[in-house]
Amino acid sequence: MGGNSFGTLFKITTWGESHGEALGVVIDGCPPRIDLSNEDIQKELDRRRPGQGKGSSPRKERDRVEILSGIFEGKTTGTPISLLIRNEDVDSSPYEEWREVFKPGQADFTYQAKYGIRDYRGGGRASARETVGRVAAGAVAKTILKKENIDIVGYTVELGGIQAEKLDFEEIGRNALRCPDRNAAIAMEKKIEEVKLQGDSLGGIVEVLVRGCPPGLGGPVFDKLEADLAKALMSIGTVRGVEVGTGFGVARMLGSQCNDPIGPKGFKKNDAGGILGGISNGAEIILRVAVKPIPSISIEQRTVDQAMRPVSLKIKGRHDVSAIPRINPVCEAMVAIALVDHLLRQKSMQSFFP
Amino acid sequence: MGGNSFGTLFKITTWGESHGEALGVVIDGCPPRIDLSNEDIQKELDRRRPGQGKGSSPRKERDRVEILSGIFEGKTTGTPISLLIRNEDVDSSPYEEWREVFKPGQADFTYQAKYGIRDYRGGGRASARETVGRVAAGAVAKTILKKENIDIVGYTVELGGIQAEKLDFEEIGRNALRCPDRNAAIAMEKKIEEVKLQGDSLGGIVEVLVRGCPPGLGGPVFDKLEADLAKALMSIGTVRGVEVGTGFGVARMLGSQCNDPIGPKGFKKNDAGGILGGISNGAEIILRVAVKPIPSISIEQRTVDQAMRPVSLKIKGRHDVSAIPRINPVCEAMVAIALVDHLLRQKSMQSFFP
Amino acid sequence: MGGNSFGTLFKITTWGESHGEALGVVIDGCPPRIDLSNEDIQKELDRRRPGQGKGSSPRKERDRVEILSGIFEGKTTGTPISLLIRNEDVDSSPYEEWREVFKPGQADFTYQAKYGIRDYRGGGRASARETVGRVAAGAVAKTILKKENIDIVGYTVELGGIQAEKLDFEEIGRNALRCPDRNAAIAMEKKIEEVKLQGDSLGGIVEVLVRGCPPGLGGPVFDKLEADLAKALMSIGTVRGVEVGTGFGVARMLGSQCNDPIGPKGFKKNDAGGILGGISNGAEIILRVAVKPIPSISIEQRTVDQAMRPVSLKIKGRHDVSAIPRINPVCEAMVAIALVDHLLRQKSMQSFFP
Amino acid sequence: MGGNSFGTLFKITTWGESHGEALGVVIDGCPPRIDLSNEDIQKELDRRRPGQGKGSSPRKERDRVEILSGIFEGKTTGTPISLLIRNEDVDSSPYEEWREVFKPGQADFTYQAKYGIRDYRGGGRASARETVGRVAAGAVAKTILKKENIDIVGYTVELGGIQAEKLDFEEIGRNALRCPDRNAAIAMEKKIEEVKLQGDSLGGIVEVLVRGCPPGLGGPVFDKLEADLAKALMSIGTVRGVEVGTGFGVARMLGSQCNDPIGPKGFKKNDAGGILGGISNGAEIILRVAVKPIPSISIEQRTVDQAMRPVSLKIKGRHDVSAIPRINPVCEAMVAIALVDHLLRQKSMQSFFP
């Protein structure tokens, strides 16, 4: 009930603090006999490391995953897969200064309110570093989905007010921001440089696309596929909104515009984003999340300490300007995990069909 | 795993089809010794009935709730509360004609894909009528929240492209659309009349506000308060997007704008919408949902039947033009249920504090 | 968390008090397209009615089940099945006298301690009448198991100190006590008559046998098949012990006696009772439960009232002398429900096998 | 759904194979601000190590626990506690010979049936070594219970047919078998020596006593306290039966004997074993489990290999003669974990009382 597990048939439990010994995840319910190697997981972890994709950035051997259980002779056994990532070279000294301070936009205040205690070092459990376990588990989920020819890709459609105006899948892997529009990517990079000099940060929007999902996934009432996907995505620290298909755009549509006509070969358009009545309809699943600017900024901020006395805060150190693009593989991971769970649920149900 | 339950400590299970015998809900985990009457529940059900609030509309005695268990001498006993609402005067004959047809924007296609069978009458389990159980359970949740001085109100901030421009709480109860802006409400009503004549339908946006929520509710990782609220709201049939606080607006903000400064008396603004790091911060909780136009329209639509043969469909009968405002109490109900669950979880945790 | 649900993929939620309006159960996760009629359920309910099987006992139309949802044109649809049984002709007046008294061996004291309130009429939620919902859900589970050629039978192997000495399956249905040994059944009936005259009650042992269960059901750690079956059975009001296979007999065995040798055609004996390492092995599953004497006796008892003042209690009215044989179908129902749940879990896992 | 988690509010997830890299447990839902040291956990792990308690046995530094998360400055923080125990000096070579053989009384056959793959080395996930994670989590649970003055002790009441005839609590810690009767302990030790020479193994009975448990713990229907305790205990590998209070003894009692009379100072006897109607009554909770002889014996056994061809098996290596007394702390751990879960549930419910 601490809320550190996600999923039902395919269930992950993450643990760890940013400046503790290690972080990790236990995956329970992975089907047996699936080929799974250290590299399958490591490559996803590498995608969420700082500075990845920036061309010449020197590779640092960080976030090395260790598989502790559940794999035998290169295959899953059906028993829990425990994955461990050690925290290395953590330096908690910068945090000592603000030990008693509630940083704006961060979880200090609420953790103190909830628990009466908190690990103030680097955000503790509230750190974005917590997502390491999600991405590791997501790599396992993606391996399962690949067997079923289901593919998930997350890309940046807006950053700092600049919108991608085309969707060129080839381009996504070519730029550091994972933006499907080359010109937009260049403008976004420029915006990031500007804002970095000001010590400020930027928000944006990430779109996640699922291709190859069969119809029939999802429960029709509370466990609607979009409801579980919304929870999956909204559980990521900086996400403040989730939409499926046309999303908030439906507010200004007529029913005759919004309904997707069906022809002998399937849906003729996809405003529904691949989900009808809580159940996948075989079309591409389209999701978008709003990502808030990273709250750690070096601009001076007004706040209070634990005794509610006013404090003027200037956070030192290097921080990302935006959670994008490091959040993209996290979004993919959460979507993958939720889909595997529903896939297993659906396979169980189908097994009774004549 | 059929996904018809929601919640953990305060858990509801709904059942029933629109043209079956009855619908209902079982509430498990309601604390004992709480005063609860039939009227507490009936008044919420009345708010979601068709035609309610339209001034002179003649009261029809529909959706009468029957309390079957869990109440003794006017108080909850801690055992499951079973609530029953009979379906009355259901006429399934209009549905016979389209029995084999997949109606666009509706769940016919996906139910068939998932289950290989469906109750085609009036949408069956996928009908908006399914929300009757949610609203009944929400009434119980609201009764609990009232004891803790927590109050929830849902209102219409956009409909058919018309936006509310002010937030006058007094006004919400005065117009049928539960819009907090009188002028906007009048324009919305006019828009509805127009679209009704065309046989089309309208989407909109509902905002839900929670006042009086104490800090400390929510789990910090997967069960973030906003994640559970997003699931709760996205599980409502016509909802296609959910946001908290500034929501998708964060995509264009700087960190220095988005962070809410804290002063000795608390948060100085509320872009976070009352939730930080997945945990309530004591400020008002603000949520918004995108509501799609009702898919049942009388305009001719192209679709297919179960053999995937083309069909031209014209749905007869009277349907609402918009899920708004009947969806508003459903949104309130889901938020109330999720909050009670987190309240119980938090009380359990706090009980160990010195 | 009120603990009124059982199962994960096949989940039942029961509700209702013995002297309330009604009792019932919601079954969530039943596979679709299974033929299910009112009679399938009614015949199981009839087996747990008072006085059933006693030859000439006049049929009273009690415990009539009403199917409220989840069935369409005689088949399950995959949506929740809601079953309702009204309480008829309940007379609560005999309970008024002991309204404030904690009856020995009953739940008055503990309900008051837990909830601070209780429905004292006829045991309320603690009544054996609560099992009506279990038996109704068990009938659905049995229907599913029958499709898989799995069969469950519960019979009386000890009552009032008299043990069945042979296992004649034909005999089980022939005597009212569901005892597989005709002579023992006669002696048990005689014992019951004696004890009835004294106003006392009797305990016994019921064995439940599962035939046709395939190997592979069960989770190997906490959700061992025998662990879930033990919970299922120990959750029945009067059960005080559960054992599998040789059960407590293993305490006096050597490993060389206890291990079941395996031959080319399978296990050569079945001390394991069909479960090894928490997983079914394809042999018959054998379970036994210890059933305590019914606590409602007309012999005078010493107890206290809610103010802890001494009271001398004599319970009037007609009560069964033993929970056996009415508990037998309840045991079968719980085993059936747990098995269907594990069957669905296993089918989901197997679906990934090459 | 892999079934490697136990509990709801206080939830543990164990992982690891006997000859893999490591084993461990993640504890989610531990209340914050509780003092917890490495030593609190290590001392319980030491109790389940081989050869412990045998007086002069040289201490080997095995099963060292590492706390990876959830503790800050010596206190729990409310975030998941991840505990790791490395497997050291594992030698899998003895298992190579029987790699394809289904060992009688063990899980080889059923794991193969369920998963189609298994880690044959040392029992893999089915090894008794899996209980390391349970005992580590149990140490945390015991720390919480100690704050509430609840104490759990497990002791040997029967082994190899020899029964303890007195219950001297002082004696339990004095002999290696944790038997509360000194003379019985001596006879048991002698019996063990005899059977060891024969290459055989022994079963027995362990009793677990809970002192200081307040009334009110437990859910009244499926989550009866004894039902959850039965599941907790039956989930331990060698347990084949569980009983509460008088247990199977109730089968031969009259109601007038079995009911515990209540006086102004509480229950006058305790045949109920501290639980009435599924809820603790404030008396001592008494549980007993039947422990089967360890299936790994060096006596020759008939079995088959994976192709179902006959094989004659002689297991080499040193194995314990009985799971007792190493199973005793495992039983205590499982009872502790289940009790903390119900304690948290009850505290949540009570928080609403006036």
Image (tube, coloured by chain):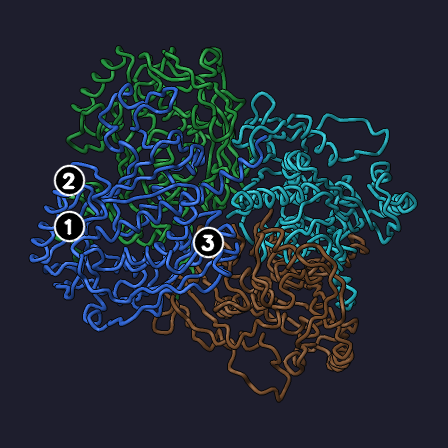
Chain colours: A brown, B cyan, C green, D blue
Q: Amino acid at mark 3?
A: Asp
Q: Farthest residue toward the bottom?
A: A56
- Label 3 belongs to which residue? D35
Mark with earlier residue (3, 1): 3
Q: Quadrant of the C terminus of chain D?
A: top right
Q: Are marks 3 and 2 on the same chain?
A: yes
Q: Position of residue B207 (x, y in %)?
A: 77, 49
Dot placed on the residue nearer the N-terminal end, 3 or 2: 3
Q: Which residue is more in the foreground, B299 or A162? A: A162
Name the residue that disc number 1 marks. D202
Question: In the image, are marks 3 and 1 on the same chain?
Answer: yes
Q: Residue at x 38, y 67 (%)?
A: A69
Q: Which residue corresponds to mark 2?
A: D163
Quadrant hosting residue C191: top left
Using a 10 Å C-alpha cutoff, classify the residue at mark 1 as few (fewer than 14 neighbours), some (14 to 19) or many (20 or more): many
Could you tell me which quadrant the N terminus of chain D lies in? Answer: bottom left
Badge 1 sits on which subunit? D
User: D25 and C251: which one is in front?
Assistant: D25
- Going by the numbered disc 2, the residue's amino acid type is Gln
- Element class at badge 2: strand
Element type at mark 1: loop
Alpha-carbon span between mark 1 and mark 2: 13 Å
Q: Is residue C9 above or below residue A310?
A: above
Q: Of callouts 1 and 2, which one flags the residue occurring earlier in the amino acid sequence?
A: 2
Q: Nearer the viewer, mark 3 or mark 2?
A: 3
Q: Residue at x 38, y 74 (%)?
A: A74
Q: Say what amino acid the circle numbered 1 marks.
A: Leu
